[in-house]
Amino acid sequence: MAQNQTGKETVVPVKPPFKKPFKRPKRLRTGYEEVSGYAFISPFIIGLIAFTLYPIVYSLYLSFTNYGMGGTYEWIGLGNYERMFTSDDTWRQSLKVTFLYAGTAVPIRLVFALMVAVALNKIVEAVGLYRTMLYLPSVVGGSIGISIMWRQLFGNDGAFNSVLASIGLPTHSWLGDPGTAIWTLVALYGWQFGSSMLIFLAGLRNIPKTFYEASAVDGAKPWQQFFKITIPLLTPVILFNTIMQTIQGFMAFTPSFIVTNGGPMNSTLLYVLYMYRRAFEFFDMGYASAMAWVMLVIIAIFTAVIFKSSDKWVHYND
């Protein structure tokens, strides 16, 4: 406090004690930071090189050799591919079965998953419980145990024939008939619709309800709302599910291996199962590698065609 000439007390501001300005510590050397970063991501890099990139390049090399897992290599150039396209009837049969399987199982799974997702989108109470129960088949559907259960279910003395016999209908050898065996595998694939259903459900939840309310005011019926609002706004999700399920359909292995083992008469011999046989039963690793690269090209072509066609039927918000 201090007094001025009038005798009144004035407050004299007190300056805070002097403090040195804060200085950031010197940064570590750049080279040391880079080494530390690479050290932390080295497990991923090593795994990527050892278990992904190297096997891909090595299989491409094996596809041009006559390697039979005996330790000797014989460079034959395009011999495996020429043999595959010209003289291997079993390869053509496996390709035919795979196209039939993917061409029917994938649309069935997508349609069924969309129908269930639309139904769940209208449920308000206990939707989490229903969603979990419907997703369970996708979690356990690709396992060996479920495939064995499916084989017992459609066997000659299985539950399916027992139900038919109980209501007076004729039974059938579903797995022993070349005309019906493939459809049991299609049914198994369609039963595992949970993952696609969840993706569809997430897409449905992102559609604004105001669109439906405005269309209802204009007199639109539910089926008109579905085809004029739901489907167009859901096309990006449909595109994603179509690509993922198509790839999975072409790479199916467990159902054919466990349920039917490719029979009867190679009617369920999927491509990957035949490739497995060439590699680990006939020990023709070079030929199996060539088959793997042909399948890669086929999947790439289908994926490119789907992406190319998406410009005409996929609608985005912008």
Image: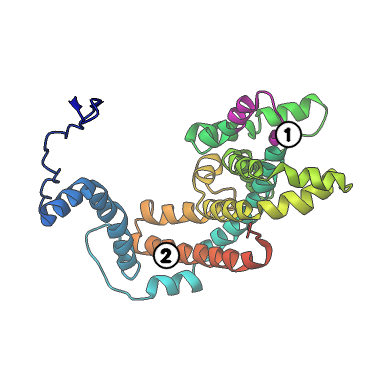
Spot occupied by residue 268 in the image (x, y as percentages of width and height): 58, 50
What's under tag 1, amino acid-wise? Lys
* Residue 122, disc: 1
Q: What residue is drawn where x is 28% and y is 57%?
A: 69
Is residue 173 something that shows in the picture? no
| Residue 221, x across and y down, in percent | 87, 45
Give x and y (percent) for residue 108.
68, 48
Give me the residue at 38% from left, 75% from top.
78
- Asked which secondary structure carries label 1, the reply is loop
Region of the chain picked out in magenta, as a range = 120-134
Viewer-side residue, 179 vs 34: 34
Q: Is residue 94 above or below residue 179?
A: below
Residue assigned mark 2: 293
Q: What residue is at 51 percent from the left and 56 percent from the top?
A: 271
Quarter placement of the N terminus = top left
Residue situated in front as seen by the camera: 126 or 45: 126
Against 60, residue 69 (above or below) is above
Q: Which numbered dot is residue 31?
A: none
Task: Please name which of the two marks, 1 or 2, marks the residue nearer to the observer.
Answer: 1
- 277 and 118: which one is in front? 118
> Around disc 1, counting alpha carbons within 10 Å, would you say few (fewer than 14), some (14 to 19), or many (20 or more)?
few
Q: Main secondary structure of the magenta part?
A: helix
The amino acid marked with disc number 2 is Trp
Q: Is residue 284 magenta?
A: no
Tell me if residue 128 is in the magenta stretch: yes
Q: Height in image: 294 above or below 145? A: below
Q: Residue at x 30, y 59 (%)?
A: 53
